[in-house]
Image (spheres, rainbow, N blue to C red):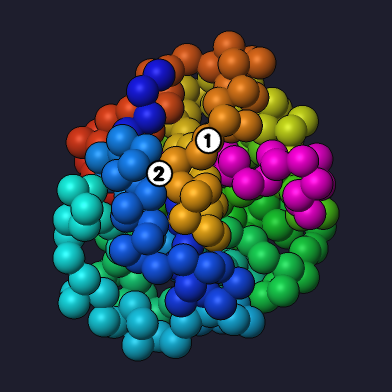
């Protein structure tokens, strides 16, 4: 599979990341990517950029270092009824919205509560991808998540950073094997995201690709080889 896009990256605007938009774009170009999504954390994260950062995206070039750029946000779930950490009027202006659960914003609840939070929040226009649904400390009904994501046209992320040796998220490898089997069963699409917080990690998806190989996951259910198809998915979620 030829990887042409990375759907989940951060810049130093998220203060626990270390590179600029320009450095990330150059890294994407060096890896032969055609499209790169910048998805800094929404303002409820403890060290996220101010809301003005997102309002100012229009000043950024749409092509940088020969790479098409998408400027969006990694949203936080804020309650178990589907609240998210960005007002809808601003989310509507984002090119891409990743929906994630971070316990520094909302402590994990029961499996049923966590699942309900995702199922409700993914209905929101502008939510394009379910971010890193892979952590044992945030238990989920993965089949229910896959079924609803397929129904509403949201992509499910396989997060490369979660699979790195020693990463703080627990059980990611086995959870992704389970998630991917449900995706095959129900025909749900996945997006591979580096979750890069430093430019050299842009486009590095080796661990994600390895777990796909382990379950013999079909290439036609992976969005990363087709920028046009990816943008069609995003447009349908507006």
Quadrant of the image for the C terminus?
Answer: bottom left
In front: 113, or 189?
189
Q: Which residue is mark 1?
A: 205
Q: What percent of the width, then of the height, locates residue 164?
A: 70, 41
Residue 83 sits in quarter: bottom right
Q: How far apart, in angstroms, are the residues tagged by discs 2 and 1?
A: 9 Å
Q: Residue at x 40, y 44 (%)?
A: 6
Residue 108 on image: x %, y % = 77, 64
Q: Nearer the viewer, residue 16 or 222?
A: 16
Q: Is 137 located above or below residue 194 in the figure?
A: below
Q: Quick check: can you spot residue 218? A: yes
N-terminal label among 2 and 1 = 2
Residue identified by numbered label 2: 6
Q: Is residue 30 left or right of residue 207?
A: left
Tag 2's secondary structure?
A: strand
Q: Is residue 153 visible?
A: no
Q: Residue at x 73, y 59 (%)?
A: 113
Give how far across and how far down residue 54 sits, in percent. Answer: 34, 78
Residue numbers of the magenta segment = 154-171
Name the residue located 59 percent from the left edge and 81 percent from the top edge: 47
In the rendered view, tell whether residue 83 sits above or below residue 164.
Answer: below
- CB under 8 Å between callouts 2 and 1? yes
Q: Quadrant of the N terminus?
A: top left
Of all residues, the one furthest to the top in this rendering is: 216
């Amino acid at each position: 599979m030829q990887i042409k896009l990375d759907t989940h990256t951060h810049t130093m605007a998220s203060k626990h990341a270390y590179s600029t938009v320009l450095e990330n774009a150059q890294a994407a170009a060096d890896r032969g990517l055609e499209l790169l999504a910048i998805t800094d954390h929404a303002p409820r994260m403890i060290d996220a950029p101010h809301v003005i950062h997102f309002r100012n995206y229009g000043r950024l070039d749409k092509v940088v270092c020969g790479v098409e750029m998408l400027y969006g946000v990694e949203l936080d779930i804020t309650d178990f009824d589907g609240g998210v950490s960005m007002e809808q009027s601003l989310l509507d202006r984002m090119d891409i919205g990743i929906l994630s659960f971070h316990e520094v914003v909302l402590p994990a609840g029961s499996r049923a509560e966590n699942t309900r939070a995702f199922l409700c929040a993914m209905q929101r226009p502008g939510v394009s991808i379910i971010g890193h649904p892979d952590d044992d400390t945030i238990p989920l009904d993965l089949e229910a998540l896959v079924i609803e994501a397929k129904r509403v046209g949201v992509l499910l992320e396989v997060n490369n950073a979660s699979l790195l040796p020693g990463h703080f998220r627990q059980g990611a490898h086995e959870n992704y094997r389970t998630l991917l089997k449900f995706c095959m069963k129900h025909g749900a699409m996945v997006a591979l995201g580096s979750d890069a917080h430093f430019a050299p990690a842009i486009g590095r998806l080796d661990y994600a690709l390895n777990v796909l190989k382990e379950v013999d996951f079909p290439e036609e259910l992976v969005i990363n080889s087709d920028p046009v198809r990816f943008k069609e998915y995003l447009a349908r979620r507006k």
